[in-house]
Image (spheres, helix red, strand yellow):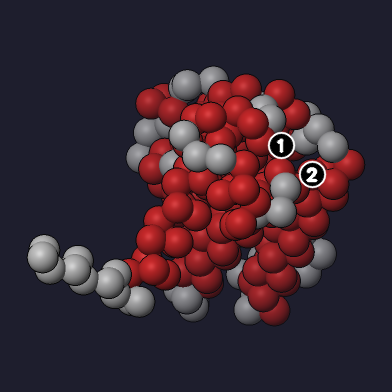
Amino acid sequence: MSPRPPAPSPTRQPARAEGMRERIIKTAIGLFARRGIDRVSIREIVAELKVTKPVLYYYFKNKEDLCREMFLRYALEAAQVRQDAGEAKGAPLEDLLTAVLDGHLRFFKARPEVARFALQALICPGSAGIRRVVEEFEARHQRQLVAMLHQWEKAGVIRRGAAGDVLRMVSAVLTHFVMCMHLGRGAGLDAGLPRRLARLVCAGAADA
């Protein structure tokens, strides 16, 4: 009589579940980035994964839930970039802006599919539910940037009342980064670009 195979360790189950969750997210974000959220169905995602729909629905209720998870992850990473920049207390505005822009650029270059997905979601979110997810993320992103800039105002890094204009300039730069990554022009965004752009933003802020 052959020996009974050992039962799977309970500690392996969470790791296996997390691995499948990561596979779903990675596959879906790649499809969304290439084709757009509204043009990719759940059926196509599970076909790419070679699993059944119930497997995907075990982790995510629907495409809206999946997109919310993707945006949440990006929001957390973007928040970390801003937190790292904010830790340089007493640094001049140019250094603070450079840290913010450089952090985002390095993130987009390391995760170009995220930049493409974000742009696809902003341009053509598809359903009303996904549109709400996008709007929630955009509002949260803007609030966090505004909070950071108001801290800089209180610290005297930028003059009172300038936060709104600096926010528009920073948002324009980040949008440019995303567009370049989407168009496959990320190689043209060199490592010195954040510093040069920060210097220009500072010149504009000083003259405002």
Residue on which disc 2 sits: 130
Residue 172 visible to the viewer:
yes
Q: Which residue is drawn at 71% across and 24% down?
A: 39
Residue 124 occupies quadrant: top right
Q: Residues within 10 Å of mark 2 (few under 14, many from 20)?
A: many
Disc 2 versus disc 1: nearer the observer = 2
Is residue 196 in view?
Answer: no
| Residue type marked 1 | Ala
Image side of residue 106 versus residue 147, left or right: left
Q: In this view, does 48 lie to the left or right of 5?
A: right
Please tell me whether residue 64 is drawn above or below residue 179 in the rendered image.
below
- List x then y, in percent, for residue 111: 44, 42
Quadrant of the image for the N terminus?
A: bottom left
Is residue 146 placed above or below 40 in the rendered structure? below
Residue position for label 1:
121
Q: Measured from the top left, where is residue 35 in percent x and y?
A: 62, 22
Asked if labels 1 and 2 touch by Cβ distance under 8 angstroms, the answer is yes
Percent from the top left, x then y, of residue 57? 65, 51
- Marks 2 and 1, the one that precedes in the sequence: 1
Element at label 2: helix
Q: Which amino acid does label 2 sit on?
A: Ile
Residue at the image position 45 percent from the left and 46 percent from the top: 23
SS at circle 1: helix
